[in-house]
Image (cartoon, helix red, strand yellow):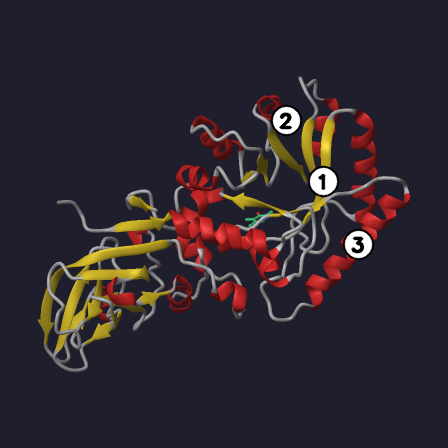
Amino acid sequence: MSRPLRALIDLSALRENYQRACALFPQSRAIAVLKANAYGHGALRCAKALEDIAPAFAVASIEEALALRAGGITQPIVLLEGFFEASELSEIARQGLWTALHSQWQVDALLEADLPAPVHAWLKFDSGMHRLGFSAAEFAANWRALAASGKVQDMHLITHFATADLDDHRYRDVQLEQIAALRGALQHEGHEVPCCLANSPATLTLQGAGNWHRPGLMLYGADPLEHGNTSSHALKPVMTLESELIAVRDVAAGEPVGYGGRFVAPRATRIGVVACGYGDGYDRHAGEGTPLLVDGVRAPLAGRVSMDMMTVDVSHIETARIGSRVTLWGSADGGASLSVSEVASWCDTINYTLLTGVMPRVPRIFIS
Ligand SMILES: *Cc1c(COP(=O)(O)O)cnc(C)c1O
């Protein structure tokens, strides 16, 4: 026997979510975003599961891309932040990677590089996020220079929405206007500007836009929206993080439990000890009462999360014993489920951080 903690990864749910992302934008192609180890789910296995249906993948660095290549993935892979050093360019050309260009030094490096073949370049427009990318004037100048250089092929505009997850679409629409104006101006000069716009929240809320879209979180079945909609509610959670009770004890009224004695038993209380803690990526900010499922029944966290364990009040769960199944998020036996978004709200964070935070020491078990 080994430590009873595992992340079950449902690869058929991943495929279904990917197909949903395609169906939402039927006239666009969906790039499956696999950065940060596929948001904690295992990048190579997720890429393999999508290989026959996804025309391209996206990651955050050449290291992440080369790991997919080493695993046999042959699709184009987009580097969302481009290269960090000009020396990566020859490998980018050799490996058929597509690179974003967000800063002038990157454009200049590409224009000066001596490459075996033109590179697929995605020029980043800062349409309002104000994180990466060029202003409209800089973008247009770089587009013209790159188009004339012979160093690039299949250039696209890429941009990112800052607020697509919010109910209030006004700023997103301001960004859309910026994009339309820039494309219109370049088109006027005879430059067709294909584009890649939407992340998951925009995929779920915009009625189509762009030649490509780049869903990330939604592929993993977590809801990226401030308040979900019909499409986001239909997503299938891919990860179930589950463990077991490794001890059960009775604590008298007034006795504290765990570090700092944050939880004090209000009455005679049955406490279950779960083999999962912040050393596994579970958030230590989880508040008193954060829900868990024990034998499929909701039970409140009681006391601070430790590195390898946490404690849960199972007074109301007759079946609770050593070996009882504990679901930290995902689905449990008997049809019960607990969303990673709900857990995140108890931790003052978002589902993105909980999923990407699952540590390497947690074995991923892939099911399809
Ligand atoms: C991470 C990322 C995405 C995917 O975002 P989600 O909200 O997870 O869909 C898309 N585009 C860029 C540039 C990103 O960095």
| Real-space CA distance between mark 2 and mark 1, rounded to the nearest whole angstrom | 20 Å
> Which residue occupies the foreground of this view, 278 or 23?
23
- Give the farthest residue toward the right: 189
- Spot occupied by residue 24 in the image (x, y as percentages of width and height): 59, 57
**196 displayed left or right of 54:** right
Cβ of mark 3 under 8 A from ligand 1: no
Quick one: label 3 or label 2, which is nearer the N terminus? 2
Residue type at numbered disc 1: His
- Spot occupied by residue 322 in the image (x, y as percentages of width and height): 11, 61
**325 displayed left or right of 57:** left
Residue type at numbered disc 3: Ala
**69 displayed left or right of 204:** left
Cβ of mark 2 under 8 A from ligand 1: no
- Spot occupied by residue 185 in the image (x, y as percentages of width and height): 87, 48
Q: Look at the numbered discs 3 and 2 and tell me whether their residues touch, using CB distance below 8 Å.
A: no
Residue type at numbered disc 2: Ala
Alpha-carbon neighbours of circle 3 within 10 Å: few (<14), some, or many (≥20)?
Answer: few
| Real-space CA distance between mark 3 and mark 2, rounded to the nearest whole angstrom | 31 Å
- Spot occupied by residue 15 in the image (x, y as percentages of width and height): 45, 48
Which of the numbered marks, if any, corresponds to residue 183?
Answer: none
Q: Does residue 366 lie above or below 170 as drawn?
A: above
Tag 1 residue: 156
- Give the farthest residue toward the bottom: 267
Tag 3 residue: 180
Quick one: label 3 or label 1, which is nearer the N terminus? 1
**Quadrant occupied by the N terminus:** top left
Alpha-carbon neighbours of circle 1 within 10 Å: few (<14), some, or many (≥20)?
Answer: many
Quick one: label 2 or label 1, which is nearer the N terminus? 2
Please state which of the two labelled residues, at mark 3 or mark 2, is closer to the viewer. Answer: 3
> Which residue occupies the foreground of this view, 261 or 49?
49
Tag 2 residue: 86
